[in-house]
Amino acid sequence: MPDQLSNEVLLQAVREYGTPLYLYHAEKIREQYEQLVSGFSILDTRFFYACKALTNISVLKYINSIGCNIDCSSINEVKLALHAGFEPDRILYTSNGIAFSEIEEAVAAGVHINIDSLSNLEKFGRKYGHSYPVGIRIRPNIMAGGNLKISTGHDASKFGIPVSQLSLIESLVKDTNLHIRTLHIHTGSDIKDPDVFVQGMEVLFELIPHFPELEVIDLGGGFKVPYRPGETATDIPLLAKKIKEAFEAHPIAGDKKFQIWFEPGKYLVSESGYLLAEVTVMKDTGNIEFAAVNSGLNHLIRPMMYDAYHHVLNLSNPDGTIKKYTVTGNICETDTFASDRDLPEIREGDILALCNAGAYGFEMSSNYNSRYKPAEVMVSNGKISLIRKRDNFEDLLRNQL
Ligand SMILES: *Cc1c(COP(=O)(O)O)cnc(C)c1O
């Protein structure tokens, strides 16, 4: 939601590559990136695509080609970013709970690093001292985001070093002569209210005087995108204005020229993606009419994991009589995609599209029930290209002895 591609293009992709199929619309990704760039033009910003949302290498190459930088959550994502052609200065590794050896690998690759524990910060200081500028992920102890599962900055969250441990951070920095260039927060996902970002910043502002070598304030990702009809995204120009005002109003932060970094994941790729599936079985149980498709929580887990709403389109019968349906998958587990949804009449063989499937869709997919992961295609300038083959039976046995 909202739609950008015609039913014709989506159905053409299904005719060429079958179902279930993930489809990404390249121009929509670019449009979202341009919204960020123009919305934040009043500030000195850099954007790092949080690639854990979708790491298909063709998508990463596309993101690179439009000039966006990249944020990684594992050393393998750093390697994928390098493989996709990002230079080390355009790669950020925001780590959590990782072995120090991954941080050593990231240093060897020359990428930016945000560290989120006192333990790794100390190891970093002992090994690299002042030689390698680094960022600290702070836990600001504020509640933010669409729901608890995707809220990461509150006072029971595992992410970041609690702001209350400032004195411990300070003595570590002093003892090991760390070069702290960045303070980072990422408070959650699906954050609509610009004031939540400002609240997080206010927490960071208090820390600024303690880190004289600071150059970057990294406010993470979490911008909201519309999922339901009528929903709106985070108002980016308003957010930019509020951030600028908060900086200017602050007695210390206002005098310094910080660069502001963001790590948008969902905002860049969510709406570009569709999961296309075929209706395999219609089952009228009297009180509920179920439409089962040849996919399930093995391919798109967000509805079951986060109670996420994904808009459904009946591509092959868009003008049918509207009726109520519950759309499920074919997995041996409750895998409801949509409950009590008004949809044009669904028949066996119809092709349904689940919208907003670009972020945390394929990326969180599995082979549960020994089913294949879907193929992925990208549509660019109306041209449909295969960017990942569908799994086959060999893939299920690969690595098994
Ligand atoms: C997941 C994540 C993001 C992206 O969050 P979205 O809600 O997809 O924008 C950004 N930064 C960090 C550190 C993350 O873990």
Image (cartoon, helix red, strand yellow):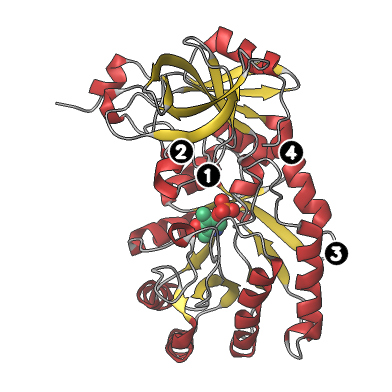
N-terminal-most mark, 1 or 4: 4
Which disc number belongs to residue 258? Answer: none
Q: Secondary structure at mark 3?
A: loop
Q: Give the alpha-carbon distance from disc 2 to disc 4, as whole Å.
A: 20 Å
Q: Amino acid at mark 2?
A: Glu
Considering depth in this image, is 381 or 321 the residue closer to the camera? 321
Residue 145, compared with residue 14, is above or below; it is below
Q: Quadrant of the C terminus?
A: top left
Which disc number belongs to residue 30? Answer: 4
Q: Give the alpha-carbon distance from disc 3 to disc 4, as whole Å.
A: 20 Å
List the single residue furthest toward the left: 401
N-terminal-most mark, 3 or 2: 3
Q: Secondary structure at mark 1?
A: helix
**What residue does disc 2 label?**
363
Q: Determine the residue positioned at 59% across, 47% down.
A: 266
Callouts 2 and 4 close, C-beta under 8 Å? no
**What residue does disc 3 label?**
42
The quadrant where residue 253 appears: bottom right
Residue 12, compared with residue 305, is above or below; it is above
Q: Amino acid at mark 3?
A: Ile
71 vs 319, left or right, is: left
List the single residue furthest toward the front: 286
Q: Amino acid at mark 4?
A: Arg
Q: Quadrant of ligand 1?
A: bottom right
